Each structure stands twice: as C-alpha cells, then as structure tokens.
Amino acid sequence: MQTIDPSKVPYKTLSNGAKIPVIGLGTFGSDNYDAETIAQAVKMAIKMGYRHIDCASVYGNEKEIGIVLKELFAEGIVKREDLWITSKVWNDKHKEVVASCKQTLADLQLDYLDLYLVHWPFPNYHAPKCDVNARQPNAVPYIHEDYMKTWAQMESLYKCGLVKNIGTSNMTIPKMKLLLRDCKVKPSITEMEIHPHFQQPEIYRFMKDNGIEVIGYSPIGSPKRPERDKTPEDTVDIEDPAIVAIAERQNVHPAVICLKWAVQRGQITIPFSVKESKLFSNLKGVTEDPLTAEEMENISKIDKHCRLVKGQVFLWKNAKSWEDLWDLNGEITA
Ligand SMILES: NC(=O)c1ccc[n+]([C@@H]2O[C@H](COP(=O)([O-])OP(=O)(O)OC[C@H]3O[C@@H](n4cnc5c(N)ncnc54)[C@H](OP(=O)(O)O)[C@@H]3O)[C@@H](O)[C@H]2O)c1
C-alpha cells in the first residue's frame, strides 16, 4: 500500500493547543457500504497515514471501528495520542448526552474523544433510511432553552476530560449567537456542509471571526448519496467546468480539486471513501501541488448556494419547507 507520512499533513492548532489534521476520513456509509466495510476503510486509512476520523453514533458503525482501532493500537501501527477522533450525539439523545458519549467511548474502545459534537440543533428523531417526506409527530423547532440543557451536558463531558473539545454541527448564525452568549465553554469547532457549490461564506466568516474552526462535510458534493436525498435543483461539483479544468491540468480526479480548495480556503475537510486508490489520492492531494491564486479565485466564483443535506426529515408538523431549518432571513424559525 502507498502511504503518506502523517507529519506532511497540515493541521490546525486550536486555542487550547490541540492539533487537528486538516483532512479526516468520513465514516457515513449511507446506504452504500456496511459497517464492516467502513471499519476496514478506517484501518486502511490509518495505515496509509490518515490521523483524523469523523465518526457519529448514528452512522451505526462505531463498534466495528472500535475493533479496528484496538487492533491498530495492539499492532503498534499508531498510538491513541496520535489520532484525532470525532463523534457526535444523535438527535434522540439530547437529554442523555453523557450516557450517549459513554456508549460511543465503549463502542470505539477509547478513554476519550478529541471532539464531541451536537450532530443537529433539533432533538427530532427519524428512522434510518426513512423517506424524506416522513415527519416525526413529536418533532419541534429549535428551542434554545432545551439546546442549552444539551450544551450543559457537553460542557460537563469537557470538564471531566471524557472529551477534549466540544462543538456543534448544522448550526446557523442566529443559533450560534445565542449559544456564544449563554455558554460557559465555547464550541471550538463547528461542522457544516461545504463544497465548491455550497461555500457558505457568511457563516464560515462568522465562525472564524469568533475563533471557531470549521469542518466542512460532504466536501466532494456527496456524489453517492441516495436518490431519495437528491432533488432536481441539485448541482454536481465534480462536473463543474472550473473544477474539471483544474483537475485536467493537475491530472487528478475533480474530487481532489474540491479537497485542495477546501484546505487552502481554511476549512478542515472530511471526505468519505472506502477505496484504497481514492483514500490515497485524497490524502496525497492535500499535501502537494496547491491550487494557484487564480484557481482559488475561479472556484470562489462558482458557488451555486446548493445545499445538498437539506434535513427535511427533521421538520416539525407546521414547518413549511426545509428552508425553515436554516434561518435564511437571519432569525430563528419557530
Ligand atoms: N455533521 C453532519 O451532519 C454530516 C452530514 C453529512 C456528512 N458528514 C460527514 O462528512 C463525510 C463526507 O461526506 P459525504 O460522505 O456526504 O460526501 P463526500 O465526501 O463529499 O463524497 C463521498 C463520495 O465521493 C466519492 N469520492 C471520494 N474520493 C474520491 C476521489 N478521489 N475520486 C472520485 N470519487 C471520490 C466516494 O465514492 P466511492 O463511494 O466510490 O468511494 C464517496 O462515495 C461523511 O462520511 C460524514 O463523516 C457529516
């Protein structure tokens, strides 16, 4: 197997001195890959030089990933302190964050997480693989008081050392402003959808200006997401002429250009694949041949404001459309 020296992979230093590699492996297999296949991809990726893995309890594979982590430690391939492991509390566990985190730690066979995120700001459960039009009868809009109770549990995990950093995911600026106003421990990282056709410049700037690092998910535009998660308006990043032209010049897949753009722009990127050649080209891509200033400028102009992970399944009864989840007019939709 071809490998990359992990010390060649850039990282970001957080305010508490923690270092997070700018590329991590996503582990959401969606409908396409089973838990064992993803766990084996994690093993391959770490042997290849990846040091950052993006997990979540809802991905349904933390037990299998825990087994391979244990094997990697036992084989002396990597030490725990050299890895960055993220996980996330799922929507139906907002009132049981500590128990959920402990379950994740047991499944991953770890003593601590490097980062624990609130996966969504809504406590709305939906069954895995359910139809996008399914609505949970008890679903509610964002309730700040409840979110702060969830956040207080996140802070307790941080204070007792079970997690080294805490953060958010799928937030909006107005929700984040309230959290920053009311929290005792600030989120150090936020995870949100970012790819060339969905650059989210305003919230990206807001987070950075508030000292919060950004992890961009679906960085390639999630080309293998299930059909039920696609809409006719969705655009395809890896077919964009600007991306394709740069890929041809560099003789790499357009996916790799999306990742180079992500890292050079300043976000942390977590592409998913279970295939050796793709894992390798993605890791290699962020360590060499940066894009030129002109290429970065060209990509900055192809934003299509095309959100792919719309979150319809989290809508409450009287919500009008998925836009209600994202506070588009700058106010929290109640
Ligand atoms: N916080 C959240 O709410 C949230 C939401 C969504 C995702 N995430 C995280 O973000 C991760 C990544 O997002 P994603 O899985 O939606 O999408 P993505 O990383 O944008 O796209 C993944 C797909 O791109 C293809 N690909 C990867 N590298 C490639 C390459 N070099 N050349 C050609 N094709 C390539 C893969 O195809 P193959 O399958 O053929 O390898 C894979 O299925 C997830 O796994 C998850 O960890 C978080």
Image: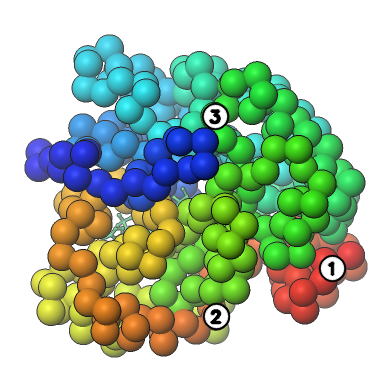
Amino acid carrying label 1: it is Thr
Horizontal side of 46 relative to 267 (left or right) equals left
Residue 141 drawn at (x, y percent): 85, 58
Which quadrant is home to the C terminus? bottom right
Mark 3, Cα crowd under 10 Å, few <14 / some 14-19 / many 20+, is some
Q: Is residue 9 left or right of residue 315?
A: left
Q: Which residue is mark 3?
A: 164
Q: Are marks 2 and 3 in contact (CB under 8 Å)?
A: no
Quarter assignment of residue 330: bottom right
The answer to whether marks 3 and 1 mark residues whose Cβ atoms lie closer than 8 Å is: no
In the foreground, 290 or 139: 290
Q: Is residue 114 left or right of residue 146?
A: left
Query: Can you say which quadrant of the picture contains the N terminus?
Result: top left
Looking at marks 3 and 1 on the same chain, the residue that comes earlier in the sequence is marked by 3
Q: How many dots with numbers?
A: 3
Secondary structure under badge 1?
A: loop
> Which residue in the structure is indicated by mark 2?
305
Name the residue beneath numbered marker 1.
333
Could you say which disc has been placed on residue 141 in the image?
none
Specify few, some or many for label 2: CA neighbours under 10 Å numbering under 14, 14-19, or 20 or more: some
Residue at 62 percent across and 52 percent down: it is 169
> How far, Cα to Cα, is label 3 from label 1?
32 Å
